[in-house]
């Protein structure tokens, strides 16, 4: 099924029934799942819900194993932690429909229906008047989660949902993990701007990355600064630059410079959240108390009528531009709201990462988010969205169906399957089986980012030239070959020159 915004990751026709629910219009879609509005077909409450469909047996074994882990994390938390500031899960269902192979076996999470997200609110109205009250509710949700023995692991505006009454809920628990003493273990990927310095370069073990509740405290400090000032607390025009700033701050070579217009009481709170080490950060109970005081609240409360109206007005206006935080990444609209609503989703996808990646140079909209996210998943500042886009252009001209059996290379990134086996998994472990063509962009592009992130630090620091281009040459040959050659190997020079050309072309002027 294809909608106005392109293909849905899990296409479900309008009117399709699963359990007691009838699928209505789509809400959001991403590479690995889609969310639809659901309407109850019989008696009972609630009457509406968000139906999150996750892929089926038609996916690759690697996709299924990874998605099963993420689904299990989310389901387990929902089943064991029911708190008023966390989005509710009503039930889980499994589609049993052999006549529809694309749906048969899909897992469906029936979730509380939200009206918008904090990300949508901030996109429309930076520094919203309701910000302090929303921050108090977000902090309540974190405290409820931590008190139950869980860490969220990916707190950011897109994962804070706004309800019909204007209140806030934490959502998207794919990265959540249950504490085992002082630590939990989560997958190795999160949003760099909201990740504390100690985790940006943390060692990744067999069970993933070790994480503490203090990681959520750091993320809350960043989020509070963004909500109250409209800017990140660490300097830099790109996530890579802000990662460098976080490293300098953690090393003690730079000081934290918060926005001058941040109110004093919030300045103290944000500073306590963004302490250099996890040991120095404020504890959850003390944080909640201080946040409530700063927000003018002696106890938890909902937004009043004026705050509720203001929040919902901007959240629903920008709903087509930002996903609701159900764990998918691109908004779609097929609800009959008019052609303008459909175009809004396309515009949002086309503009994704626009500060880092040109939107007017022919990079296909369908791959922008994969490209930007693949770069952001790497902590090496040289691995940027323009670099990955340039390499995809040179490798295949963005052709997802490329097949070159003579060289044993396939897909948009020209992967050799026996090599891709070592990079296709997000946890860094080799796939149990060698992937078989066709190799999808959702597999190829993140794997390219992971490989580049691996090779760049292994290139000699004394090599001349642009290290981004050197990393591209290493992708075509190997980092050992580049090191031994002392630069771009002769057989890769034409390739490197083309990458350098498109790297310049795809980089926005202000990011060069």
Image (cartoon, rainbow, N blue to C red):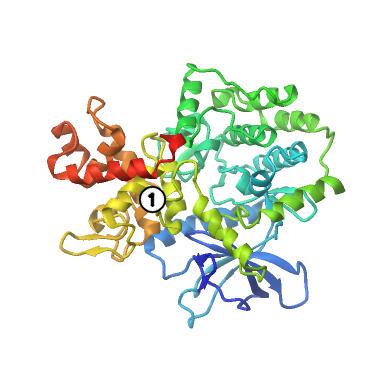
Query: For this view, does 456 lie left or right of residue 118?
Result: left
Q: Which quadrant, please, contains the C terminus?
A: top left
Could you say which quadrant of the image residue 458 lies in? top left
Could you say which quadrant of the image residue 28 lies in? bottom right
Residue 17 horizontal/vertical position (percent): 62, 78
How many marks do you count on the picture? 1
Residue 285 horizontal/vertical position (percent): 72, 32
Can residue 328 be seen here? The reply is no
- Please say if 172 is above or below 210: below
- Please say if 256 is above or below 198: above
Query: For this view, does 197 lie left or right of residue 231?
Result: left
Can residue 408 be seen here? The reply is yes
User: Callout 1 environment at 10 Å: few (<14), some (14 to 19), or many (20+)?
Assistant: many
The residue drawn where x is 55% and y is 64% is 34
Q: Residue furthest right?
A: 305
Query: For this view, does 69 lie left or right of residue 420?
Result: right
The residue drawn where x is 35% and y is 46% is 388
Foreground pick, 228 / 188? 228
The residue drawn where x is 63% and y is 36% is 223
- At numbered mark 1, what does the secondary structure look like: helix, strand or loop? helix
Q: Which residue is mark 1?
A: 446
Foreground pick, 353 / 508? 508
Residue 504 horizontal/vertical position (percent): 35, 40
Could you say which quadrant of the image residue 275 lies in? top right
The residue drawn where x is 31% and y is 52% is 393
Query: For this view, does 30 lie left or right of residue 486?
Result: right
Residue 411 horizontal/vertical position (percent): 30, 60
């Amino acid at each position: 099924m294809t909608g106005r915004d392109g293909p849905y990751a899990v296409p479900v026709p309008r009117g399709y029934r699963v359990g007691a629910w009838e699928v209505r219009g789509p809400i959001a879609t991403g590479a690995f799942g889609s969310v639809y509005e659901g309407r109850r077909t019989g008696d009972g409450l609630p009457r509406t819900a968000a139906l999150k469909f996750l892929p089926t047996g038609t996916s690759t074994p690697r996709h299924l194993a990874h998605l099963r882990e993420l689904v299990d994390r989310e389901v387990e938390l929902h089943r064991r932690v029911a708190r008023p500031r966390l989005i509710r899960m009503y039930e889980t269902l499994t589609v049993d429909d052999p006549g529809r192979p694309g749906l048969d076996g899909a897992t469906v999470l029936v979730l509380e229906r939200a009206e918008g997200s904090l990300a949508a609110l901030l996109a429309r109205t930076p520094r919203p008047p309701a910000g302090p009250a929303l921050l108090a509710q977000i902090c309540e949700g974190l405290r409820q989660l931590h008190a139950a023995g869980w860490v969220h692991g990916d707190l950011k505006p897109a994962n804070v949902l706004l309800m019909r009454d204007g209140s806030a809920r934490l959502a998207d628990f794919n990265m959540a993990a249950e504490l085992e003493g002082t630590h939990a273990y989560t997958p190795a990927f999160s949003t760099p701007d909201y990740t504390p310095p100690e985790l940006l370069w943390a060692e990744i073990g067999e069970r993933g990355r070790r994480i503490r509740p203090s990681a959520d405290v750091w993320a809350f400090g960043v989020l509070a600064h963004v909500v109250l000032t409209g800017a990140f607390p660490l300097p830099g025009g790109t996530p890579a630059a802000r990662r460098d700033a976080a490293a300098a701050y953690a090393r003690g070579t730079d000081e934290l410079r918060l926005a001058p217009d941040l109110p004093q009481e919030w300045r103290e709170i944000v500073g306590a959240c963004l302490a250099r080490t996890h040991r120095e950060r404020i504890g959850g109970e003390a944080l909640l108390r201080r946040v409530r005081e700063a927000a003018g609240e002696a106890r938890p409360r909902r937004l009043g009528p004026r705050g509720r109206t203001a929040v919902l007005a901007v959240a629903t206006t920008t709903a087509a531009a930002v996903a609701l935080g159900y764990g998918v990444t691109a908004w779609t609209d097929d609800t009959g709201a008019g052609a303008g609503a459909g175009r809004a989703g396309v515009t949002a996808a086309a503009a994704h990462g626009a500060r880092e990646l040109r939107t007017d140079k022919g990079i296909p909209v369908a791959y922008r988010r994969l490209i930007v996210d693949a770069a952001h998943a790497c902590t090496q500042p040289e691995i940027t969205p323009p670099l990955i886009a340039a390499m995809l252009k040179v490798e295949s001209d963005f052709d997802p169906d490329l097949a070159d059996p003579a060289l044993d290379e396939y897909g948009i990134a020209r992967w050799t399957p026996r090599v891709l086996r070592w990079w296709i998994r997000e946890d860094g472990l080799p796939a149990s089986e060698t992937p078989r063509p066709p190799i999808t962009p959702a597999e190829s592009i993140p794997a390219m980012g992971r490989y580049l992130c691996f090779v760049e630090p292994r290139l000699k620091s004394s090599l001349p030239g642009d290290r981004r281009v050197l990393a591209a040459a290493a992708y075509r040959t190997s980092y050992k070959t580049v090191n031994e050659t002392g630069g771009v190997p002769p057989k890769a020079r034409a390739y490197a020159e083309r990458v350098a050309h498109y790297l310049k072309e795809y980089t926005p002027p202000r990011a060069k």
